[in-house]
Image (spheres, helix red, strand yellow):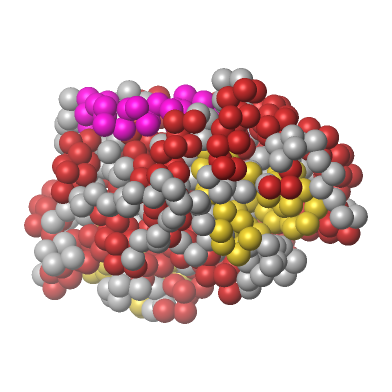
Amino acid sequence: MRPFGKHAEVRISILGMGGHHLGDAQDEQTAVALVREAIDGGITFFDNCWEYHRGKSEVLLGKGLKGHRANVFLMTKVCTHGRDGSLAMQMLEESLHRLQTDHLDLWQAHGVVFENDPELFMRPGGAAEAMLKAKEQGKVRFLGFTGHKDPAIHLSMLHTGFPFDAVQMPLNAFDATFHSFQTQVLPELNRRGIAALGMKPMSGHGEPIQNGAITAEEALRYAMSLPVTTTITGMERPDILRQNLRIAQKFEPMVASEMRSLEDRVKDVAADGHFELYKVSLKFDNPEARMAHGFPLDLESAEVKEMVAAVQNTGHPYPEIPK
Amino acid sequence: MPSGANDQFTRREFVRGAAAFTASAIAGGESIVAAKKNATPQAVTPSSGQPVPKRPLGKTGAQVSALAVGGYHLGSTKDQQEANELVAKALDAGITFFDNAWDYHQGLSEERLGTALQGKRDQAFVMTKVCTHGRGKDVAMQMLEQSLRRLQTDHLDLWQIHEVIYYNDPDLIFRPGGAAEALLEAKKQGKVRFIGFTGHKDPAIHLRMLAHDFPFDTVQMPLNAFDATFRSFETQVVPEATKRGIAVLGMKSLGGSGEMVRHGALTAQEGLQYAMSLPVATTISGMDSIEVLEQNLEVARGFQPMTAADMQALRDRVRIYAADGRYELFKTTKKYDGDVGREQHHYPTPQKLPA
């Protein structure tokens, strides 16, 4: 357990359960069992998002948490993607309903990945206003934002002056070399007492692990050894959950020299970003977010076909792709 | 431009096709067209008699033309005769700067330029690039000899390290025995007058190269109206180079593929005018036909920079199209990264990467 940024009275588990992968669980029963086993294993931080699997992830987590809500720190994300604050409030009500709770511990703006997102977030009538209102109404305790794309965009969100309690970002041994959140964003969060939430410790889908560049244990231990409040990772199967729980339960932070030597070992394969495509490729932009921004989807391009196909959370982007 | 990156869209196509944008391919395209209609077209003053102006090349004391002929596209001309004609016409119009690279079209681009410059070498400022991609000084020196032979000259005016686009490139280039040593050696031998580097990927990598405090005379980078708001070389690298008197060479004034023009986000003229109005020594533009050269010359003859207010208005107008990087795919995808470079770095080809 670690303190939640400057809110030291709030303590959360060093390992967080990712909400997207929960929706990938074989069936509802498995998902519910995963949540229960995670709680039993000491996990208190649960991640989710309004748009994961078109709401299925939130519904499953709501069922899994039944009777355990008081024992966990519950986060979900709002998916306005630059749209109005009123839409954010509607999404909040839906999320609360699906999660079967009257409040969230943390509510974050999802997918801050485009250069103009900070401006859209802060605009009059935008999502920033909705977040403050939700906090005032007691529906959420803390506020934050998340994005996987570019440290510069995170910094410009921080420069808006909005009172964020938490910020989520990809943190792993590859990130240390390429478009680094670790070197550019993490120190700023630590300085301001904003809780840093790491994600993608295994680079999203574990490609470098399958490839043999790093082991799952090295990857997770490295991410958890950074000055973060928690590390969120997806665990859609009991064996993955158990593997991660084992690593987390016996966790001793890596010493600095151990971290440096791992960074050095993967530096050359990290240097083109092919294990962190979420930072560069348009393929990793959620089509829903693109459309909310008015960015075109080139339906004829192979990249967008792949992109649409890759969006496991919908299969059919929302709103309808214009024909 | 790395080989193959832009074969599918030639400049010739978008000279003809700029207006023939089809909304069906791109959802949301109508708003781009609408924005274009609302835009005030830049008036081009008739300038047919005037030469392309010269500008100082940083603090080197040399002068180069404000528009340069890109070497990759010279290798895409239909034959040597067309290349000869293009180079002669460019020289007549006052263009002195000719870009090239050791690996463009497997040497064909250098050969075409060498032949086209026969008897005219002293009128031209010849640049080519060395493609070590992390390999050392010896490989670089061999490439230099090959380049000189193909270009039919005993010296280069400018020799640059090509495609510095990976985060470990600065380390590889500056390691003992690395390519940086070759630059100094070649300069000492009098085989090259000036030295520099180029890359299309990330301002952070350029800054890391510049942090080495190496005596670079030039640095080449993508500069266009879209770059200004997305992973911007203009805001991050140009000021640093300018401060140190290192000449800035702009490239990809139309985003590399010209897609931004074909989709109607701006005109080819606006794109080139914007790039040439930045504090750069020259803007390198690919021209694979006389037609494209003529179009560029319309902008470049007697060139007058845009006002700061006009530049700001254009940046603001295209900002919404720039914010996701879709018109600067050389920054966001692997498809502009040369296969040889990826191979030398032991990276999988883009086709082998996860979707």
Chain part drawn in magenta: B1-27
Nearest the viewer among A302 and B11 is B11
Left or right position of A287 against B163: left
Left or right position of B188 against B309: right
> Magenta stretch: dominant SS?
loop
Nearest the viewer among B8 and B190 is B190
Nearest the viewer among A270 and B219 is B219
Instruction: Determine the residue located farthest toward the top in the rendered image.
Output: B79
Residue A61: x, y in percent?
28, 45
> Can residue A97 be seen from the camera position used here?
no
Residue B264: x, y in percent?
27, 38
Q: How many marks?
A: 0
Residue A292: x, y in percent?
21, 45
Does the segment drawn in magenta span residue B12? yes
Residue at the spot x=72%, y=52% of the render? B158
Q: Is residue A278 above or below residue A257?
A: above
> Can residue B112 be seen from the camera position used here?
yes
Residue at the spot x=62%, y=22% of the render? B81
Residue at the spot x=20%, y=39% of the render? B33
Residue at the spot x=19%, y=46% of the render? B35
Quarter holding the N terminus of chain B is top right
Residue A123: x, y in percent?
18, 65
Residue B99 picture quarter: top right
Instruction: Determine the residue located farthest toward the front in the rendered image.
Output: B49
Does the segment drawn in magenta span residue B59? no
